[in-house]
Amino acid sequence: MTRAFNFSAGPATLPEPVLRQAQEEMLEWNGAGASIVEISHRSAEFMAVAQQAETDLRTLLGISNDYAVLFLAGGATTQQALLPLNFAAPGQRVDHVVSGHWGKTAIKQARPYVDVNIAATGEADGFHDIPPRASWQLSSDAAYVHITANETIHGVEFRDNPDVGDVPLIADFSSSIASEPIDISRYGVIYAGAQKNLGPVGISVVIIRRDLLERSGQPRADIFDYRSHAARDSMLNTPPTWNWYLAGLMFKWMLAQGGVEEFARRSAAKSARIYAAIDGSGGFYRNEVAVAVRSRMNIPFFLPSDELDARFVSEAKAAGLLALKGHKAVGGIRASLYNAMPLAGAEALATFMRDFQQRHG
């Protein structure tokens, strides 16, 4: 078997050692006589898996005990609907800074419950930049400020932790979490779907400053209440146990590789290879994002024609470089360089890009 380099934006590539361990343990886990997917989530065996996963994630990201860590079913979009229910009063104002497609999605999920103020948006220029902090029109009475740390589709990334004063800052880190150190203390809530940098699709991580759990929020079913999930160690209902287990393997792999500091180094090296191929192409390849906010995780770029875009994707697949077609919202090409993508993958893509240009430029 030969594994190709998978540049999918999500579900994304996973490390081969993690997949092989999961394969080896699939029929029987840890001498239990049953698979991990067959063991009760309330059993001592699985509770140990869950606790170890949380411990490893806290170590990996430097999460203090001032924050609760939840492992919840679903993706980031589910959390976007739960945030106003848990942290804002009915109709209360919340501020959103919109830097791309997923920032707009977060607003769509919040609007049924709160008064959304778009404090800043980069939509006028096609989401090629992030509005400077000085231009944000923040509300004096907002329940929180929401940002998207990295936009998977448009390829823009916050390269700092914006100061929003005493109002809690909530951030969707789905596509950049664990790719570099994060100052958790600057945020009220960090949430992330696991399927890009943390593991498989179907589970999300939510990191909540504990004082925010004291907010009354809005009338909601118990299953939508973060307080209830925190009180039951994310075992309020049957969680996606396989996904949780696999994410735990991913955390251990990342720690063994050197942690977020090492992945920051790798991310810089991988993205530099691709941006160099783009910037050195004389305009054959085009990335439209402002250099200061270029994403390290997701690099969209365009060729001179749609026909060349399609040919690039087809020839790349034949060369063992998968899932490079851009999102339908913007078209073109997109290379996703999450933690499990090795430097060799970025180098192979950069080499292919130069070869493709020589043949078709």
Image: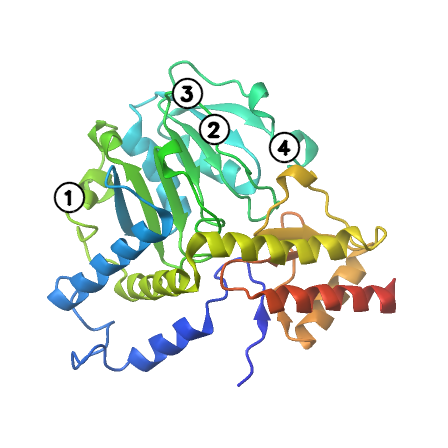
Q: As drawn, is 293 to the left or to the right of 72? A: right
Q: Is residue 43 above or below residue 145?
A: below
According to the image, label 4 marks what residue?
123
N-terminal of the pair, mark 1 or mark 3, is 3
Which secondary structure lies at badge 3? loop
Seen in the picture, residue 182 relative to 31 is either above or below; the reply is above
Q: Which mark lies nearer to you, 1 or 2? A: 1
Earlier along the polypeptide chain: callout 4 or callout 1? Answer: 4
**x, y percent for residue 336:** 58, 57
Q: Residue at x 59, y 48 (%)?
A: 153
The Cα–Cα distance between marks 3 and 2, rounded to whole angstroms, is: 15 Å
Query: Relative to residue 109, is residue 280 drawn left or right?
Result: right
Colouring used for the render: rainbow
* Amino acid at circle 1: Ala
> What residue is shown with label 3?
165
Residue identifier under label 1? 231
Q: CA distance from mark 4 to mark 2?
A: 13 Å
For disc 2, the marked residue is: 96
Looking at numbered disc 3 in the image, what kind of residue is underneath it?
Gly
